Amino acid sequence: MNHFCRRLHGPCNVLIAVEAFCEILHQSAHVIMAYFMFTEQYLIPAGRCFHFQLIPSFGMNVGTFLNLSIGIDRIFSIIFPFFYSNVSRLVYLPVTTIPALCYGAAIMLATYALLDEQ
C-alpha cells in the first residue's frame, strides 16, 4: 500500500490535485448565485458582482490554464520519458503552476481595470 501511495505523488498527480482545488473554488460560485436567486435579488451592481465572483473566477481561470499544463505535462512525459522521470518536482511544479497563477491574476486585474473605467 505504501508503494502505491508514493506513486501518486508524481508531478502530474500534484497538478491534477491543484486543478481539482481550483475547480472547487470555481464551483463555489453556485452557492453565491443560489443565495441571490433565493433572496430574489436578480440584479446587482457590476462592482458588487465582481467582488462576489473574484475567487470563483480566479479558480476558473487558473484551473483552465492548469488543464493546458497537465496536457503539456502528459505529452512531455510521453515524448521524453527518461528525462521526465528524472525531473525535480521542486523545480517542475513551480514552473508549471506559477504561469497559471499569473494568468489568473492578469485576467482578474484586467477585469478590475475595465470595471473601474465604467
Image (tube, rainbow, N blue to C red):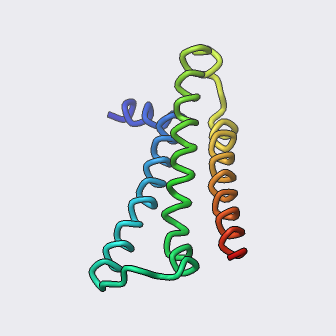
Instruction: Report the front residue among 107 and 19.
Output: 107
Residue plotted at (40% across, 65% down) = 28
Q: Is residue 101 above or below residue 14?
A: below
Q: How many marks?
A: 0
Image side of residue 28 versus residue 60, left or right: left
Q: Residue furthest left?
A: 38
Q: As drawn, is 16 to the left or to the right of 40?
A: right
Q: Position of residue 53 (x, y in %)?
A: 50, 70
Q: Residue furthest front?
A: 118
Foreground residue, 80 or 118?
118
Residue occupying image coordinates x 27% and y 81%: 38
The answer to which of 33 and 14 lies nearer the viewer is 33
Q: What residue is at 48 percent from the left and 37 percent from the top?
A: 9
Q: Is residue 18 above or below residue 115?
A: above
Please state the horizontal and vertical placement of residue 99, each as a whole percent of the image. Answer: 68, 46
In the picture, the quarter occupied by the N terminus is top left
Q: Quadrant of residue 68?
A: top right
Indicate the position of residue 34 as horizontal and vertical percent values: 31, 73
Along the horizontal axis of the image, is 86 left or right of 42?
right
- The x, y position of residue 18, in whole percent, is 50, 48
* Residue at 50% in and 41% down: 14
Q: From the image, which quarter does the C terminus lie in?
A: bottom right
